[in-house]
Image: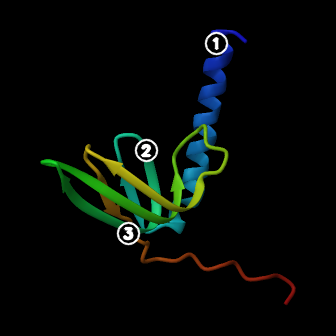
Amino acid sequence: MSAEDLENYETEMELQLYREYRDVVGLFAYVVETERRFYLANQVDLQVRTADGETYFELRLADAWVWDVYRPARFVKNVRVVTFKDVNVEELSKSEIEVPEPPLRGR
């Protein structure tokens, strides 16, 4: 496998991941970013902890989707992250306009 083949493969995997994200984002209430991962989740609990004079964040997510091209399964029931780096949590706004289903023909 050449370097170009590998680059093309990685580009295709990222594109597939983006498409999956686009398809599932509407199922979740929160976007969560850490220094290592990007998550979509329906429940988020962020706690600031201190131990030995150090401050860290403990993050618990439920019903989550993980942005990781190398994960075989991106839907996760529970996630626990402990980090000394910043954590960003944003609540997604739900569209106030819902598109109705098209009527069934022949009924």
- Residue 31 vs residue 28: left or right? left
Q: Quadrant of residue 92?
A: bottom left
Image quadrant occupied by the C terminus: bottom right
Residue type for callout 2: Arg
Which of these two is toward me, 10 or 95?
10
Q: Residues within 10 Å of mark 3 (few under 14, many from 20)?
A: few
The residue singled out by tag 3 in the image is 93
Residue lying at the far right in this picture: please name it: 106
Q: Residue at x 45, y 53 (%)?
A: 39
* Label 3 residue SS: loop
Residue lying at the far front in this picture: please name it: 52
Q: Quadrant of residue 99?
A: bottom right
Q: Position of residue 61 (x, y in %)?
A: 44, 63
The residue singled out by tag 2 in the image is 37
> Disc 1 vs disc 2: which is toward the camera?
2
- Image disc number at residue 4: 1
Gap between marks 1 and 2, in whole Å?
26 Å
